[in-house]
Amino acid sequence: MSANLKAAKAGMTPDVFSDDSIDLELPKNPVWVSVARLAAAAIAYRAGMPFDTIEDIKVIVAEAVSYAIQYGAPQGRLHLRFDLSHDHLDITLTDPTFPLKLPRDRNGASYKTFVDGLFLIRGLADEVDFDATPGGGLTLRIRRGA
């Protein structure tokens, strides 16, 4: 267990406060996926999360950003928000220009295919909340505990 998590459980103030939030805005371009990954890893590390959790968070963020880039409008910006707590990290990805239209599979089904693209994120995160409407934007909320 990390020093920050031990401190928080003991009622002491850890180096990272539970009300800390970090906001990151990136262009919707695949070259910026690695920056989002590295930022997420640095935030999780600073929060005292264990190595395996940090690795999961890096994959979660890379998949979420890649997903928004793949299915969203080609231009625009993505907003990532990281909210720290003593025992978890909440990540919110927002894309106001997402989606232009829902992708369709061979059978004409769109929404199921669209949501199933998040299976890796759902497998690594503790909670995932997905809200997307054509022309209404995307909000993806992800929680990962320590």
Image (cartoon, rainbow, N blue to C red):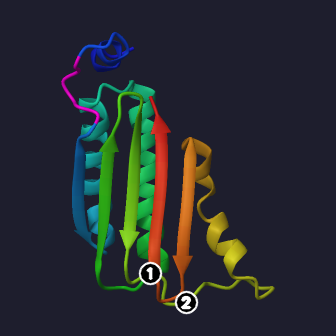
Q: Secondary structure at mark 1?
A: loop
Q: Nearer the viewer, residue 44 or 141?
A: 141
Q: Nearer the viewer, residue 48 or 90?
A: 90
Specify whether 94 is left or right of 123.
Answer: left
Q: Nearer the viewer, residue 30 or 48?
A: 48
Return the residue at label 2: 101
Tell me the residue at 31%/49% (across/down).
Answer: 82
Q: Quadrant of residue 25?
A: bottom left
Above or below, 138 against 21 in this view is: below
Above or below, 125 against 133 in this view is: above
The picture places residue 111, in percent across and down from the top left corner, at 68, 78
Specify whether 67 is left or right of 83.
Answer: right
Q: Residue furthest left?
A: 15
The picture places residue 37, in percent across and down from the top left corner, at 32, 50
User: Which of the image's four quarters has the C terminus?
Assistant: top left
Q: Secondary structure at mark 2?
A: loop
The picture places residue 109, in percent across and down from the top left corner, at 75, 83
Other-residue count near label 1 (Cα within 10 Å), few / some / many at <14 / 14–19 / ≥20 = many
Is residue 15 on the magenta stretch?
yes
Tell me the residue at 28%/66% (across/down).
Answer: 31
Specify whether 109 is left or right of 27.
Answer: right
Tell me the residue at 39%/51% (across/down).
Answer: 91
Q: Which residues are magenta?
A: 13-18
The picture places residue 49, in percent across and down from the top left corner, at 36, 27
User: Which of the image's four quarters has the N terminus?
Assistant: top left
Is residue 81 on the magenta stretch?
no
Other-residue count near label 2 (Cα within 10 Å), few / some / many at <14 / 14–19 / ≥20 = few
Return the residue at label 1: 98
Q: Quadrant of residue 97?
A: bottom left
Q: Residue furthest front?
A: 11
